[in-house]
Image (cartoon, grey):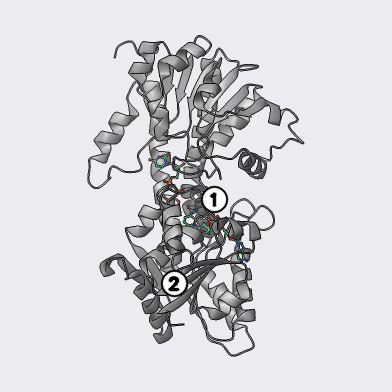
């Protein structure tokens, strides 16, 4: 075989799959194989019903699969064949033991390193793609070096900055690629080799190299800063509702300052997704570990504000609907944590659903991509709510085939995810099919509220002045 290079990626999830697909697309002479311990996951990657939904992903996979992109569960053979091995496995928050609820569990990363040390017969470059606590590379290196074959490994950190829903676009045109390595001759050579892979399509000045610890820590810091912006604007949305100011006007006015910037100032019912909360908790735990309690408390506040925002939304629904939703049908449009994904990990919608189930409402959920079984898995994992401890759970939550069915005879409709299709509906028809007064709670400021009010809806929107309360507008 005359491949320019051979890459193996351990972990075929939201990051491993799309990242490797784009490397394969941009580097036709590099052989890329994604491996996983889950046979089901690998089988799905071999079909056109991919295990994750991501716009543009299927086209890239179809173009490269069988050419230079492969999926396999033969982990040992693929490790042995590879020059560079990415570790792209999940690193969830620990649920028990030391640091439970905060520290990231890197057991999967360590396991990958042990497997590599075990089966490799030549030295490799091992790349941390997973988001990990700072200094994890040291642990990985020690595990690798403990092989009894005298093999030499180089560990690099190459965190991933893609966002779900835009993964392919982000990977094709990243703001930057970050590569951290040991500042030794071998370390620099390994980093240069990884730079040469990305240089196939990323401008050289956007590929930055740093020491290992800066690279690992930059990832946590980037996510903490992004989440902080969301919590900041969400805190202002609450103040707007109390004062009659309009949070969207504030985002615009504030964001036009170049130093602040326009993006990530959209108020929401709270940020969700598998990364923000986990990575901030990871940062908080690191600060505490080094005795920096003020730094820990500072970043923890971003999470407390997010919890407040989620709770505030459920409370507003109940309070506005005459303090009771018991027995009422409520339509929930959107369940994924953002548009263009079917991912429900840490989705803020889940907390609203939990609260409404506790209030004994009948909730009809419509989301274009979310699978019902995934809702239950995440609900149990994150909220500890399942059909054993909540016997009415399955019957109080209906997954509707479309939005119109979800809204029929409902007392309220909630917009929880900013799916584009929600903007295109016939809201007059929806209004006519609903109970009156017909409430809209727009958790994303997605819809045209004046138009809805003209139809007859009572509209409550995040951080927007409520005309019922502020008649002096
Ligand atoms: P995921 O859960 O979608 O995928 C992880 C995969 O790793 C699973 O398919 C699992 O079966 C597999 N796996 C676990 N242990 C393994 C092992 N020992 N050998 C082989 N495969 C194994 O997770 P993800 O969302 O892709 O996240 C992966 C990492 O990337 C995490 O550290 C995450 O913080 C980080 N990250 C995620 C995103 C995102 O948007 N999801 C973005 C940037 C960074
Ligand atoms: C995030 C980071 O953006 C990405 O760089 C990192 O690699 C992984 O974590 P992701 O979680 O996929 O990506 O999506 P993101 O677009 O960041 O949104 C996260 C959450 O914040 C969503 O629930 C989203 O709705 C919310 N959000 C985002 C807001 O509420 N307001 C905003 O202005 C932006």
Secondary structure beneath dot 1 equals loop
Which label number is shown at residue 49?
1
Q: Please tell me in which quarter of the rendered image ligand 1 is found.
A: bottom right
Q: Position of residue 26 (x, y in %)?
A: 36, 66
Q: Along the line of sight, which residue is nearer the eye, 195 or 364?
A: 364
Label 2 vs 1, first from the N-terminus: 1
Query: Does residue 439 appear in the picture of this structure?
Result: yes
Eye-nearest disc, 2 or 1: 1
Position of the C terminus, as image quadrant, is top left
Q: Indicate left or right for 261 with 443 as reference.
A: left
Up-down relation of residue 344 to residue 142 (above or below):
above
How far apart, in angstroms, are the residues tagged by discs 2 and 1? 37 Å
Q: Marks 1 and 2: in contact by CB < 8 Å?
A: no
Q: Indicate left or right for 174 with 75 as reference.
A: left
Task: Find disc 2 in the rendering and name its residue.
Answer: 212
Up-down relation of residue 414 to residue 199 (above or below):
above
Q: Indicate left or right for 129 with 261 as reference.
A: right
Query: Does residue 183 appear in the picture of this structure?
Result: no
Which label number is shown at residue 99?
none
Give the residue drawn at x 27%, y 37%.
254
Q: Position of residue 231 (x, y in %)?
A: 43, 40
Up-down relation of residue 427 to residue 9 (above or below):
above
Q: Along the line of sight, which residue is nearer the eye, 399 or 473?
A: 399
Ligand 1 lies under 8 Å from the Cβ of mark 1: no
**Number of residues whose C-alpha sits closer than 10 Å to that of mark 1, classed few (under 14), some (14–19) or many (20 or more):** few
Give the residue drawn at x 56%, y 74%.
140
Q: Quadrant of residue 142?
A: bottom right
Give the residue drawn at x 55%, y 42%.
344
**Number of residues whose C-alpha sits closer than 10 Å to that of mark 2, classed few (under 14), some (14–19) or many (20 or more):** many
Give the residue drawn at x 54%, y 69%.
136
Q: Position of residue 110 (x, y in %)?
A: 61, 69
Secondary structure beneath dot 2 equals helix
């Amino acid at each position: 075989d005359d491949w320019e290079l051979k890459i193996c990626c351990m972990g075929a999830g939201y990051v491993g799959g799309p990242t490797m697909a784009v490397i394969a697309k941009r580097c036709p002479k590099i052989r890329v194989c994604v491996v996983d311990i889950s046979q089901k996951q690998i089988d799905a990657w071999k079909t056109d019903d991919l295990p994750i939904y991501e716009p543009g992903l299927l086209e890239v996979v179809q173009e490269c699969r069988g050419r230079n992109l492969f999926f396999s569960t033969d982990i040992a053979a693929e490790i042995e064949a590879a020059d560079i091995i990415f570790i792209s496995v999940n690193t969830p928050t620990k649920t028990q033991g030391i640091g439970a609820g905060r520290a990231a569990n890197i057991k999967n990363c360590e396991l990958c390193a042990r497997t590599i040390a075990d089966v490799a017969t030549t030295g490799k470059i091992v790349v941390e793609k997973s988001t990990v606590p700072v200094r994890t590379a040291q642990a990985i290196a020690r595990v690798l070096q403990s092989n009894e074959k005298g093999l030499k490994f180089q560990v690099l950190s190459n965190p991933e900055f893609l966002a779900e829903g835009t993964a392919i676009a982000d990977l094709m045109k990243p703001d930057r690629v970050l590569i951290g390595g040991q500042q030794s001759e071998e370390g620099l050579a390994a980093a240069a080799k990884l730079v040469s892979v990305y240089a196939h399509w990323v401008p050289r000045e956007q590929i930055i190299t740093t020491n290992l610890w800066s690279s690992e820590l930059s990832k946590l810091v980037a996510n903490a800063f992004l989440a902080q912006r969301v919590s900041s604007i969400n805190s202002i949305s609450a103040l707007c509702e109390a004062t009659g100011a309009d949070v969207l006007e504030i985002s615009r006015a504030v964001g036009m300052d170049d130093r602040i910037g326009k993006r990530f100032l959209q108020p929401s019912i709270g940020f969700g997704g598998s990364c923000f909360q986990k990575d901030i908790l990871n940062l908080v735990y690191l600060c505490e570990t080094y005795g920096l309690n003020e730094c820990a408390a500072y970043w923890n506040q971003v999470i407390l504000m997010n919890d407040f925002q989620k709770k505030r939304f459920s409370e507003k629904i109940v309070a506005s609907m005459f303090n009771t939703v018991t027995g009422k049908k409520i339509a929930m449009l959107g369940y994924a944590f953002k548009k263009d994904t079917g991912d429900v990990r840490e989705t803020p919608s889940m907390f609203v659903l939990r609260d409404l189930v506790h209030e004994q409402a009948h909730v009809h959920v419509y989301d274009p991509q979310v699978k019902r079984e995934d809702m239950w898995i995440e609900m149990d994992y994150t909220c500890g709510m399942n059909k054993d401890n909540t016997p009415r759970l399955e019957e109080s939550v209906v997954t509707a085939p479309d939005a119109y069915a979800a809204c029929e005879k409902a007392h309220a409709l909630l917009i929880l995810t900013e799916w584009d299709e929600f903007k295109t509906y016939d809201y007059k028809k929806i209004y006519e099919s609903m109970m009156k007064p017909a409430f809209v709670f727009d958790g994303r400021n997605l819809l045209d509220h004046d138009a809805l009010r003209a139809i007859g809806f009572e509209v409550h929107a995040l951080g927007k002045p409520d005309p019922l309360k502020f008649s002096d507008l």
